[in-house]
Amino acid sequence: MLNHTTRVYTNPDSFGEELLMIVCITKTMLGWNCNNIAHICRERCGGMGFLANCRFGEYIACAHAQMTAEGDNRVLMGKITKDYLTFAA
């Protein structure tokens, strides 16, 4: 998905209105995936996952930085869905 987004971003003329939607979808999916991976890794390590030398706190903070202000990307995904329905009509 990231490679496709990069190709679209370097040649936006052929995609028109879809460029913003593709970038927003990529941000949303990567944010959810990074957040999920960081939390699962921390949980699998048990009590050791809370230690600073595991650096899971840094990864979780980076994953939260990819989320929207509401705390998740559902609002952004709702906007993308509305845009796709608008342009498809």
Image (cartoon, helix red, strand yellow):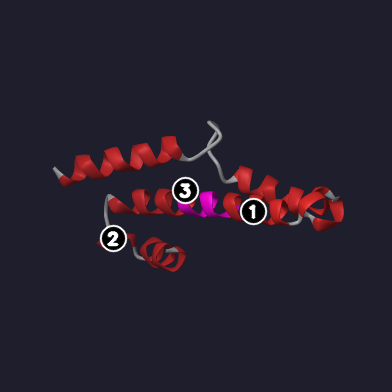
Could you tell me residue 18's position as x and y percent? Answer: 29, 52
Which mark is drawn over residue 40?
Answer: 1
Tell me what residue is drawn at x 35 percent, y 37 percent: 79
Q: Check disc 2: other Cα within 10 Å, few if <14, some if 14-19, many if 20+.
A: few
Residue type at the position of mark 1: Ile
Q: Nearer the viewer, residue 41 or 22?
A: 41
Query: With respect to residue 22, does 82 lie above or below?
Result: above
Dot 1 falls on a residue whose secondary structure is helix
Q: Which numbered disc, 3 or 2, marks the residue that appears first in the sequence? A: 2
Q: Nearer the viewer, mark 1 or mark 2?
A: 1
Residue type at the position of mark 2: Asp
Q: Magenta-highlighted stretch: main secondary structure?
A: helix
Q: Which numbered disc, 3 or 1, marks the residue that appears first in the sequence? A: 3
Q: Nearer the viewer, residue 74 or 12?
A: 74
Which mark is drawn over residue 13?
Answer: 2
Q: CA distance from mark 3 to mark 1?
A: 18 Å
**Quarter of the C terminus within the rendering:** top left
**Quarter of the N terminus within the rendering:** bottom left
Q: CA distance from mark 3 to mark 2?
A: 23 Å
Q: Residue furthest left?
A: 89
The magenta region covers 28-34
Residue type at the position of mark 3: Thr
Q: Check disc 1: other Cα within 10 Å, few if <14, some if 14-19, many if 20+.
A: few
Tell me what residue is drawn at x 58 percent, y 51 percent: 36
Marks 2 and 3: in contact by CB < 8 Å? no
